[in-house]
């Protein structure tokens, strides 16, 4: 949606215009040439043709085709050359782009021999090549172990109804004329996507990836930014409006739960943990074993941090979790969420927000979104030659999401009534 996606996030907005945006199909409302604001510093939008459709149009099944050296493609599948970008020609929904960069991507699914290897396609990887549709790159995710092939997109659809979230869509991937299967197209958090949701100038953005999930990344260790950067707070934007000196004061303040509002957008925080409780993510700020991969953005305008959703593929019972999980069960594993748990007023707001979200996005609406995604991807999923599960497992997994969602809503309503 470009700059038009900026919204005053909160329950009032979510139950009106924001929810309408999300219901249009997670990422499907992007207008013009595919959005992305100005395309970020140094982007030359004139050097690439415009896309035939918005890049993350969630109402269609995109087709992404790569032509590249067979040896280069094999090196991606074998992950033998790290993050080196290989040269390729990309055809995106019929629009041909010469000389893009392609490399392997992913976390747990990035292992040699994975035939559904995720990749990153960088439109401006090489000199003289510009952005495409306002974007410098796109993540093409293999959904290696998601039998439904829609959990991440469905969870982001839910997040997007109530807070800033990255866009997603589905696509058939073809490499050198060979069908590789059904993949998820995913927008990254970077200066372009941040500018879609927040006013400029753009501040610092961090991807927080603690080396050990049991380590609390929100403990104040001292004033020196080097105590936090580049690990576990990984900077994601070059030359932001503010520097890494913003981290330590935030961590020092949240040690006192009653100072939380001075450094953190509490509405965004409560929205995040409330959606996480509903979709039952096992990763991110409220992971099952502690905080794992997630993003924090410092907004120079408000002087506060915003937590941002990322990679919620382990959701809706995908990791064997049952719908009876208590709403406070994951809030005691880092200083930031403990601050919400330990204040009576914030606990009350958290419970109220869960109830408001389920009323704004009823389980029947969520199940209907599952049906919409299923109708869009079914043929491509069944024809996927490289998925590690059979077609019956795909059909079962889609139905299981709907069953799980209904059971989770019922359980939450019971918990809130106590």
Image: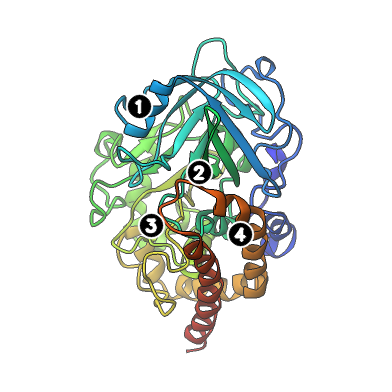
Q: Which residue is mark 3?
A: 283
- Report how far apart the C-alphas of labels 1 and 3 lie in the structure: 29 Å
- Report how far apart the C-alphas of labels 2 and 3 lie in the structure: 27 Å
Report the side of 1 relative to 305 (left or right).
Answer: right
* Marker disc for residue 237: none
If you read the primary sequence from the N terminus, does the residue marked by circle 4 or circle 3 appear first? 4
Provide residue 159's location: percent of width, then percent of height: 56, 58
If you read the primary sequence from the N terminus, does the residue marked by circle 1 or circle 4 appear first? 1
Numbered disc 2: secondary structure: loop
- Report how far apart the C-alphas of labels 2 and 4 lie in the structure: 21 Å
> Closer to the camera: disc 2 or disc 4?
4
- Report how far apart the C-alphas of labels 4 and 3 lie in the structure: 19 Å
> Closer to the camera: disc 1 or disc 3?
1
* Marker disc for residue 303: 2
Q: Are marks 1 and 3 in contact (CB under 8 Å)?
A: no
If you read the primary sequence from the N terminus, does the residue marked by circle 2 or circle 1 appear first? 1
> Closer to the camera: disc 2 or disc 1?
1
Q: Which residue is mark 4?
A: 162
Q: Which residue is mark 1?
A: 75
Q: Are marks 1 and 4 in contact (CB under 8 Å)?
A: no
Q: Is residue 241 visible?
A: no
């Amino acid at each position: 949606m470009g700059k038009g996606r900026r919204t005053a996030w909160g329950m009032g907005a979510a139950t009106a215009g924001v929810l309408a945006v999300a219901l249009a199909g997670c990422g499907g409302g992007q207008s013009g040439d595919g959005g992305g604001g100005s395309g970020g510093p140094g982007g030359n939008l004139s050097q690439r043709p415009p896309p035939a459709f918005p890049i993350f149009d969630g109402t269609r099944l995109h087709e992404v085709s790569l032509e590249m050296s067979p040896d280069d493609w094999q090196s991606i599948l074998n992950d033998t050359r790290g993050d080196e970008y290989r040269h390729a020609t990309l055809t995106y929904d019929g629009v041909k782009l010469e000389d893009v960069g392609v490399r392997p991507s992913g976390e747990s699914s990035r292992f040699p021999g994975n035939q559904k290897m995720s990749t990153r396609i960088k439109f401006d990887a090489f000199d003289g090549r510009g952005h495409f549709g306002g974007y410098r790159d796109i993540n093409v995710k293999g959904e290696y172990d998601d039998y439904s092939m829609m959990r991440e997109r469905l969870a982001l659809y839910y997040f997007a109804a109530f807070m800033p979230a990255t866009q997603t869509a589905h696509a058939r991937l073809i490499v050198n004329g060979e069908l590789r299967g059904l993949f998820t197209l995913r927008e990254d958090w970077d200066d372009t996507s941040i500018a879609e949701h927040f006013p400029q100038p753009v501040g610092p953005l961090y991807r927080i990836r603690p080396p050990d999930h049991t380590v609390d990344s929100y403990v104040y260790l001292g004033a020196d930014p080097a105590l936090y950067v580049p690990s576990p707070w990984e900077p994601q934007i070059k030359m932001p409006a503010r520097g890494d000196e913003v981290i330590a004061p935030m961590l020092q303040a949240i040690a006192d739960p009653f100072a939380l509002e001075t450094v953190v957008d509490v509405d965004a925080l409560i929205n995040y943990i409330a959606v996480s409780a509903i979709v039952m993510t096992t990763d991110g700020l409220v992971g099952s074993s502690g905080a794992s991969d997630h993003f924090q953005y410092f907004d120079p305008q408000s002087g506060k941090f915003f937590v941002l959703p990322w990679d919620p593929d382990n959701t809706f019972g995908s990791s064997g979790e049952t719908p009876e999980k208590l709403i406070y069960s994951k809030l005691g594993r880092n200083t930031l969420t403990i601050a919400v748990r330990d204040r009576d007023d914030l606990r009350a707001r958290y419970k109220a927000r869960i109830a408001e979200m389920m009323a704004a996005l009823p389980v029947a609406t969520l199940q209907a979104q599952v049906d919409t995604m299923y109708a869009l991807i079914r043929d491509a999923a069944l024809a996927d030659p490289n998925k590690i599960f059979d077609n019956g497992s795909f059909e079962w997994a889609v139905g299981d999401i709907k069953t799980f969602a209904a059971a989770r809503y019922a359980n939450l309503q019971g918990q809130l009534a106590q």
